[in-house]
Amino acid sequence: MESQVLELLEFLHQPRPEIRALAVQQLTALTPKTSEFQPLLISKRETLVPDLKSLCHDDTVVAHEAIKCLINLSHDPRILQELDDKYFLNFLCLTILIPKSVLADAACMLLSNMTKHEPICVKLLEGEAKPLPGLCESTRLMDHLVEAFHRGHKKAYNPKAEFNFLASVFSNVSGIRAGRVYFIENAPHDKLAPLTKLQIFTEDSNVIRRGGVDSTIKNCCFETREHERILDADKLNTLPFILLPLCGSEEYDLEEFEQFPEEIQLLDDDKVMIRG
């Protein structure tokens, strides 16, 4: 069977599109962690990953299968090293940002895995992008991703995508100091800190979006020199968004209640604490 798998890999770069399509569809079933052939595929990463990256440029069905393969394989650090490619990173982000892209959410999932590799986080922070009318006027790639996440909630930007897995990307990026600084400092194009566009989702119903945002806030709080800015109601004003998920309909004495941020004081009586 191993010889058949290796033979299958040869068809990924065949000139005939129908052969490539059939090959990558067959390959997808062999890539999950539960597959006995995943170690074999990882051992062939130096040729397999370039083939899969190339197939991401193919028609939508083939590209989707190629991205699924890379998602399944990219838990392995050796695969992440092969994906540490500025040009592929830019292509993947463009796939996320194009309006009506049907591959946007799959690309977000792959980017979430890729940013577990610190050099890819650095490339993302250093990445440049042309202003995209209707989304973002910035020339910083990260600003475009933040806007897609912010404006794309509930498919408002792209009817085919929710961008929830970008929250995991932001969590990974904020794991390095340059990422935390990025989220806390005001963006040049709109003078707003990117974190302010994320923190409004700490009560979101989607656990991926909510959890990634919570983790990003937590990481940013490690920048102790920025605590005053993070807490200042006239700057980032992050505290209410940390407290809101913890609040229920409990009653407090008046003196204690008046010390809460205004956003907490105005909660409805039926407010429920978010668990998990």
Image (cartoon, rainbow, N blue to C red):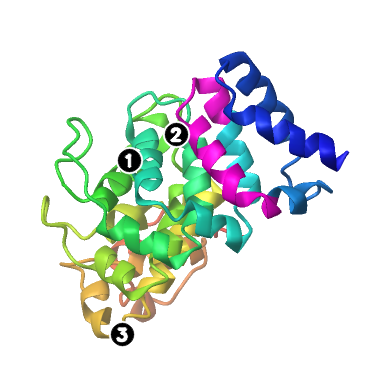
Residue 154 in view of the camera:
yes
- Pinpoint residue 144: horizontal percent, then vertical percent: 26, 44
Mark 1 belongs to which amino acid? Ala
Which of the labelled discs sits on residue 224, or is there none?
A: 3
**Measured along the vertical axis of the image, is residue 244 above or below residue 15?**
below
Q: CA distance from mark 3 to mark 2?
A: 35 Å
**Residue 271 visible within the image:** no
**163 over 161 or under it: above or below:** below
- Determine the CA span between mark 3 and mark 1: 29 Å
Q: Which residues are magenta?
A: 42-64
Nearest the eye: 42 or 31? 42
Across and down, in percent, residue 123 comes to 33, 58
Residue 230, image x, y percentages: 26, 73
The stretch drawn in magenta includes residue 112: no
Q: Secondary structure at mark 1?
A: helix
The residue under label 2 is: 104
Amino acid on which the number 2 mark rests in the picture? Ala
Q: Is residue 68 left or right of residue 232?
A: right
Say which quarter of the image contains residue 158. Answer: top left
Say which element carries label 2. helix
Q: CA distance from mark 2 to mark 1?
A: 10 Å
In this view, the residue in front, 167 or 19, is: 19
CB within 8 Å, label 2 to label 1: yes
Q: Is 50 in the magenta?
A: yes
Principal SS element in the magenta part? Answer: helix
Residue placed furthest toward the right: 1
Q: Kindly state the secondary structure of the residue where label 3 is placed.
A: helix
Q: Which mark is residue 148?
A: 1
Q: Nearer the viewer, mark 2 or mark 1?
A: 2
Q: Residues within 10 Å of mark 3 (few under 14, many from 20)?
A: few
Image quadrant for the C terminus? Answer: bottom right
Taking depth in this image into account, of 251 and 161 the one nearest to the observer is: 161
